Every structure is written in structure tokens, then in C-alpha cells.
């Protein structure tokens, strides 16, 4: 198989599989329990938390584990329910659908801007936010069990970023980025599906999305997913050890750029939706449109050849609406419908690029011919 869908999910790293397999046997006890096996499981969770905190330059207390980036995104947006929320049209569905449903007109205001887009890889910039003190809001009234205020950082505006696609591809420093909240997901860095994390800066407002347990410092109820969290920790450790963003910046970028050049040179009617200039996009994503060829058809023909890609975002497939990201960027439904996303990872090689180029020109040619025939016959 030629797997080029790493932005949708990555295969688990061997050390992640090993760590999780051992954890299933050794750390099955409920990590909140007071007995020894419970403590041992909790120690592992705290170790994973430390690794993740180190990876993004946060303190361990500023990280909570969740079921994935979708939950982390929902938790931040719901904290600001009824407040002004500003976001870009390029966000993942878990942001813009919840913003549509829960935003209002009260202060404080939340800005939620992803740092890189999952469909095109485009690197975006954050808006300037007003960091002035602002003392009147229900959000600031939260207190702990002793009546001490939980929110000590009271402002007019807060900044959240969905860093799901960025982790491991670029160095991340939440302090340098000026973030109050940041969303992370394990399965985009070689960890398991169904585990995510949320960075919540000390002292900023936060209301738990899942209520009913004291876990995660009362910020997320539910029995700890010990095995999954250990897997996330092992993946974070690999990212830290290898500084994988350096490998993406050199090796992986070369593959992505080689595919872009070959497609443009060999396939008439192809155009890039990803700006591959240095610094303009993540080095592992290439989104391309092929005139008069449908993205879904290309995906199926490639799949028949053992080549795995996605159209728009994987989360939107099965949905015939054109990608909201490409529509926002180009305003052209034809471009959006004819797009394919190739995304590379740490296991990708030049053989993958060659395999694509062996079959893609023929597939596009065939589809373009069918499209001409069908549009002729409809006259
Ligand atoms: N945000 C972005 C930018 C993503 O790419 C994805 C995964 N497609 C998500 C959120 C959702 O991640 P998860 O599967 O961990 O919920």
C-alpha cells in the first residue's frame, strides 16, 4: 500500500504499540483509585502529561487529556458559550459548527484560529488580541472548593488555537505563540485514535465539557484512558527525541515538493491549492485540483491501485458538499470538487511519489475524457 493520508491519521509508531501493549497488562487499574495499582497507573499518566507539556513548553498542570481534538475544541468553545467568538472560515468542523451554535454577544471574547489548515496545510497567522484586564463576567465567578477564585487571568480577549496538524511538524511553544488554549491530538503524531489533549493556561476561564468526576483536576470527568494516554506519551516522547519537525522540514518536504513538481509538469489541467513556498504551508501536505476530474473518482481509482489519499478533509468525505476550506479560499466549486489531498509522514519515501506518478497521469486523462464525453452528450 502507498499510504498518503497521514493528515487524516498516522499509523501508530512501533514504540507506541509496545508501550500500550505493556500498559494493557500492567496498568489496567482505575488511575483514580487509592490502591497501589491505581497509583502506578496514575504515575504513568503524569509521566505522559509531563512529556506533552515539555513538547509545547507548558506546565503539566496546564494539560488535560481528552478523547481527541474534537472534544478539546468543543470544550473551549463551550466555555465561551454566549460570548463573542471570532474564528476563521478555514477551521475544522468541530470549531465552526460549535461556534455557529454557541457564540453570542457577551464579553469576554474568544478568538479561535488554527495555526495550520488540515486540508491545504496553509500556515495562518493569529489576529492581534486585546489583552486588557476586564473584570465583569459570569465566566470569572468560578471558585474552587474553598471559595478561592479559579479565574485569576481576567481579560477582554482570549486566544485558542487548534494545533492538531502542527504538532510534530513545526516546533510548538504555546508561551511564545501567546496562546491561552491549544488543542492537540495523538493520532496525528503516531499515537492512538481517541486520545487528545487541551492546553489551558493557568488562571484562564474553563468550564468542563464532561461533568461528573474529579478527574483531570475537575476539568474533565470520566475514568482515565490510561492505555491511550500512555500511547500519546510514547508518541510525544518520539517527537521530542527526534525533533521530528526537522525531519519534516528536510526529508518530508523534499517528497512533497517532488510530487508537486511532477504533477504540474506531467498532468495537464493540474493546479496546486497548497502554496509550497517555504514557510507558507506545512511541509507534509499537498492539495491539488485537476480540471474536469472529480476528487472522489480520483480517490477511488487511486485506491484501486493501492494508493491511499483523501479528498478535501477525511472528516468531510461521505459528504458531497464541496470542501468549505477550498470554497472559502477560492470561491470556485469546480476547484473544490476536483481536489485531492496527498499527505506525507515519517514513513514516506520517494517510492511513494514514483508510485503515484506511475498511475495518476493515466487516471486523470481517463476522467477528463469521460467528463468531455458526458458534457458533449448533454448538449
Ligand atoms: N482539528 C483538526 C485541524 C484536524 O485535522 C482534526 C482531524 N481531522 C481534528 C481537529 C479532529 O481530531 P480528532 O480526530 O482527534 O477528534
Image (cartoon, helix red, strand yellow):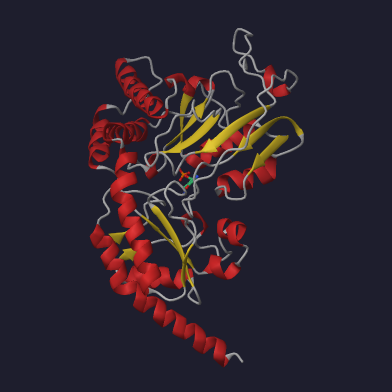
Q: Vertically, is 4 above or below 201?
A: below
Q: 142 or 344: which is nearer to us?
A: 344
Which residue is at the far front?
A: 277
Residue drawn at x 54%, y 42% is: 114
Residue 250 percent across, percent down from the top left: 30, 46
Whether residue 221 is visible to the viewer of this picture, yes or no, is no
162 horizontally vs 358: left or right: right
Which residue is at the far top?
A: 146
Q: 369 or 28: which is nearer to us?
A: 369
Residue drawn at x 45%, y 85% is: 369
Task: Determine which quarter of the picture holds residue 131.
Answer: top right
> Which image quarter is the C terminus in?
bottom right
Task: Determine which quarter of the picture holds residue 348.
Answer: bottom left
Number of numbered labels in the structure image:
0
> Which image quarter is the N terminus in?
bottom left
Whether residue 179 is visible to the viewer of this picture, yes or no, is yes
Residue 157 percent across, percent down from the top left: 67, 28
Residue drawn at x 58%, y 18% is: 203
Q: 51 or 23: which is nearer to us?
A: 51
173 horizontally vs 114: left or right: left
Residue 61 percent across, percent down from the top left: 46, 19
Residue 360 percent across, percent down from the top left: 35, 72
Amino acid at each position: 500500500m502507498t499510504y498518503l493520508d497521514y493528515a487524516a491519521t498516522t499509523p501508530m509508531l512501533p514504540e507506541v504499540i509496545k508501550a500500550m501493549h505493556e500498559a494493557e497488562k500492567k496498568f489496567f487499574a482505575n488511575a483514580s483509585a487509592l490502591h497501589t495499582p491505581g497509583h502506578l497507573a496514575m504515575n504513568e499518566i503524569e509521566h505522559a502529561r509531563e512529556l506533552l507539556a515539555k513538547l509545547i513548553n507548558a506546565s503539566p498542570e496546564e494539560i488535560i487529556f481528552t478523547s481527541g481534538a474534537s472534544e478539546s475544541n468543543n470544550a473551549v468553545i463551550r466555555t465561551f458559550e454566549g460570548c463573542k467568538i471570532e474564528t476563521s472560515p478555514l477551521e475544522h468542523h468541530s470549531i465552526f459548527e460549535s461556534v455557529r451554535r454557541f457564540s453570542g454577544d457577551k464579553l469576554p471574547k474568544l478568538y479561535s484560529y488554527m495555526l495550520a489548515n488540515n486540508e491545504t496545510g496553509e500556515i495562518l497567522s493569529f489576529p492581534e488580541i486585546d489583552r486588557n484586564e476586564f473584570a465583569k463576567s459570569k465566566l470569572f465567578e468560578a471558585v474552587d472548593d474553598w471559595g478561592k477564585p479559579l479565574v485569576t487571568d481576567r481579560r477582554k480577549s482570549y486566544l485558542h488555537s487548534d494545533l492538531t496538524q502542527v504538532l510534530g511538524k513545526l516546533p510548538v511553544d504555546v508561551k511564545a505563540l501567546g496562546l491561552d488554549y491549544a488543542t492537540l491530538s495523538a493520532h496525528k503524531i503516531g499515537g492512538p485514535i481517541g486520545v487528545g489533549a487541551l492546553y489551558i493556561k493557568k488562571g484562564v476561564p474553563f468550564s468542563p465539557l464532561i461533568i461528573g468526576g474529579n478527574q483531570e483536576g475537575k476539568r474533565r470527568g470520566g475514568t482515565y484512558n490510561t492505555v491511550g494516554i500512555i500511547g500519546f506519551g510514547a508518541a510525544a516522547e518520539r517527537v521530542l527525541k527526534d525533533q521530528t519537525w526537522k525531519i519534516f522540514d528536510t526529508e518530508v518536504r523534499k517528497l512533497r515538493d517532488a510530487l508537486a513538481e511532477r504533477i504540474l509538469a506531467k498532468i495537464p489541467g493540474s493546479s496546486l491549492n497548497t502554496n509550497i513556498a517555504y514557510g507558507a504551508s506545512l511541509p507534509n501536505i499537498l492539495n491539488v485540483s485537476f480540471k474536469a476530474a472529480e476528487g472522489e473518482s480520483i480517490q477511488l481509482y487511486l485506491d484501486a491501485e493501492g494508493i491511499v489519499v483523501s479528498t478535501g478533509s477525511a472528516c468531510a468525505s461521505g459528504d458531497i458538499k464541496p470542501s468549505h476550506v477550498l470554497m472559502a479560499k477560492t470561491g470556485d466549486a469546480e476547484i473544490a470538487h476536483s481536489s485531492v489531498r496527498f499527505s506525507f509522514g515519517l514513513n514516506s519515501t520517494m517510492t511513494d511519489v514514483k508510485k503515484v506518478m506511475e498511475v495518476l497521469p493515466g487516471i486523470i486523462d481517463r476522467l477528463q475524457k469521460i467528463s468531455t464525453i458526458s458534457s458533449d452528450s448533454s448538449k
